[in-house]
Image (spheres, coloured by chain):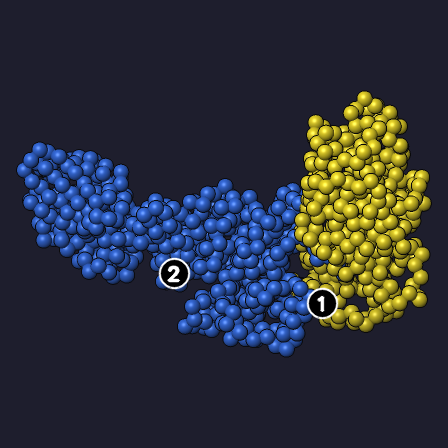
Chain colours: A blue, B yellow
Amino acid sequence: MLAHTYSFCFDGVQPHLVRVEVDVRPGPPVFTVVGLADTAVREARERVHAAVLNSGLQFPASRVRASIAPGDLPKSGAGLDLALAVALLGASGQAPRGGLERSAHFGELGLDGRVHAVRGAIAVAESALASGLRRVVLPVASAREALLAPGAQVAPVATLGGALRVLRGGPPDPLPPELPAPAARRSRAQEQLDLADVVGQEHAVRALVIAAAGGHNLLFSGPPGAGKTMLARRITTILPPLEPLAALEVTRIHSIAGTAGRLHRLITEPPFRAPHHTATVAGLIGSARPGNVGEVVLAHRGVLFLDELCELSRAALEALREPLAEGRVTIVRAGHRAAYPARFLLLAASNPCPCGYAGQAERCRCSDSELARCARRLGGPLLDRFDLRVDLNPVALPALGRNGAIDSRRARELVMGARERQAARLRGERALCNAELSGRALRRFAWLDSRGQELLERALAAGLLSAHGALRVLRVARTIADLQPRERVGADHLAGALALRCDHGTRPAVAG
Amino acid sequence: MQALPGGPQRGDPGGCAQCTHRTLLIESLGARIDVRRPDCERLAALLALPDRQLLAALDAAQEPVGGNDSEPQTAQARCGRNCRPGNTVPAFAGRVRRDEVICRHDPRHPAHEASDEPWAPPSLLWCLGDLDLLQRLRCERTLAVVGAVRASDYGRGVAGALAAELAGAGVPILAPYAEGIGAAAIEGALGAGGAIVAVALAGTSPMTPAGRPDLAGALAESGLIIAEHPPGARIRRWYYPARSRLLAALADAMLVVEAEERSADLAGPRFAAALGKRLCAVPGRITAPTSAGTHALIREGAQLVDCAAEILKHLHLDLSGSGASRSPTACPRRSAQGNDRPRVGGEAQRVLEAIARGAESTEALLALGIPVKSLLSALGELEAAGLLIRATGGRLMPGAKSARARVGRPRGSSRGP
């Protein structure tokens, strides 16, 4: 007899609907699975076999063939276990086949017949809804997450027996109790971070506020101990919460990557990812392996913090260029192609030279060639992506007694105000924030007053800016004006943006 | 490979047989010349010895380099015979295609028809670029700008600015073809469109140390690179004091911008003083090791200079009657009085004064109580006006257009925007 049901495979962060067919015929007792199945799927045979028997059901002593269609899509993961098992039960006459064909099953089986949690439940529920399936049967541990997808029809089951009961028209298993709200379980360390801790480096705080308000990429450069990392970590305290659609998108990505643990609510805080500088290209942008979501994708709609930017491998730095320019990454490997969203704010910290003390004649022992090598490593095209750069120096002792000029609560209000003004202005545009403004959009939205125009021309004439650099400075000036708030970009805003611009070289211009 | 002619000939790619022979002799003895302590005077005395005495002094009489053959030979043949075992000169004859070689019998040679020079002029000079500049070196009062390879931003900025001003005023500039002060001076002089002669260690091989490959093309285009060793020669330790001796001897005055207190940095300036050249030094902070050497030189009698006009005075150049191009109008101290200084707002003015008084980082300015928003605006405004330079590591320095005299001495009469 033949039976089929539906399940899902992941290609990148995109779930694909697959049809799981099982055919049971008289013959020698052999269980085969076809359809480009990977090891995890082929091992499903053992789990299904044991789970069926341990649930008190019959495993047919005949020839069992399973096919997962479409046949040319590589299948992977243990989420197909449940679909294989129920299709087998349908084909052997132990489950009603009508119910099977109108629902999707997604879950991993234990040998004892229990259904274990899976990654990507929310994406599966959305996809099932879009495919017109009546319901999707999911493990109880993943069901709350799947219910976050608006309109999802989810039947949580705890065991294979439970899945059979649902197929026969019985009630699903109860949902687990809801976890407390994320704000309540936020760690104390996170709670204690505040911009007010930053003393004597108000320019860096100002840059953080501008970066958060306009979505500008920011580079901190300075010697060891200047407080680069300490500053960067505090950006999480001033970013505005995610919009509902963005929250759903971020939740889906983190559900598939399995980085967020049990999700009982949408992720509304922008993600903050800080991969170590020894990260590989596959770790940064992801690889063809399903579920291996890169850091840039995990940082989507949030912040990617790269400490010791100069120490990253050349290949890793090169790989960052596509997501920075396009807002997504495309992974092309043999027989595989996947595009992931990756729109993030890049926050980086770097030593200005190998010893870290460039510019301090008393301490820096690096030669011109070492400085040039360090500058080359970052490369023009990558450095070009930073709208803001702050050179940091260690703060003198007397300043440490004071309190910072602005605390995170106030800064977050400023940021949210600026974001609202941008959203109102950019309604109907492709750009979401000032950092994404195109040259043409800038001409429409960043009018300079006459003094600002004069200052811009002077900076161009002095050779401080390239044409491209001028656009970046204008974007930042637009954000500074939004923070104030002013509708018109003035000379003061432009001058502030100039002071925080990202230079190309580390060499001083020779005065002449 | 063509045979070298026996006598001096203009435009010949080699030198005369006598000078080629002498150079080859020194090249082949290169490994034996050892200056543990860089000492230009001792080195010059050694290099000034006639062939036989030189061989004897270096204990190399048995070497097959002998001074007895007189028939002209191709440089390649000589190299092949003498230099391959020791690997001192890897076939330089094959690489001279772009460098022009002039010998002491060539009237363009700086030591042409000179005898008994205390600085042991090189027999051959490898030149690349505008050879007319050699003539200017002979006829005009020239300045050598030298200093540390590992220079600070301050040193680079000062070397570049002074070289630009003096070159712009018509003074031919000599500088070592090296990183740091040398590269900054070359860049400054090139930028001002002045006459610049860079002294390389060997031929037009890459700059040693090789920090600024970008300068070679510009130098070959509008300046001149000279060297007393063939291109591709293995760089020996004594080449450095040998270059310092050339710089000291070819210029009429030497300006030391930054130097550490060690013999490698100070050998050249001391030799210049010994040759009777005017020695000028730029002061720095007493805490900076890169200025310890210049301070030592000033203690030993070098002239302290802090602007281009001072240097022109020491070069004994007549400032008044020599035409507009020679008058040092770009001197910072003078332009301070002029009205070409861009106007900036009151807050920016205060920030600039604080920077000139030593608040060199944004953190230091914030510590003075300047609010961050107006500080950032002021910095941007100052930089756009050319009054401020943001150097490596975020260090803030008054820019070329800033009136150093006025800001540094607020009691002056011309204070105000």
Question: In front here: A358 or A462?
Answer: A462
In space, the residues marked 1 and 2 are separated at their CA atoms by 43 Å
- Kindly report which numbered mark, 1 or 2, lies closer to the viewer in this rendering: 1
Tell me what residue is drawn at x 92 percent, y 47 percent: B277
Helix, strand or loop at mark 2: helix
Q: Identify the chain of the residue marked 1, using the numbered disc in the image.
A: B
Which amino acid, by three-letter code, is at mark 1?
Answer: Ala
Front residue of this view, candidates B373 and A442: A442
- Label drawn at residue B385: 1
In the rendered view of the protein, which quadrant contains the C terminus of chain A?
Answer: bottom right
Q: Is residue B77 left or right of residue A201?
A: right
Label 1: state its secondary structure: loop
Residue shown at the point (74%, 50%) measured from the top left:
B128
Residue A154 position by quadrant: bottom left
Residue placed most toward the observer, B139 or B269: B139
Give residue A459's quadrant in the image.
bottom right
For disc 2, the marked residue is A246
Find residue B248 and name its label: none
Q: Residue shown at 74%/29% (left/top)?
A: B82
Residue B300 at x, y percent in the picture: 92, 42
Residue positioned most to the top? B62
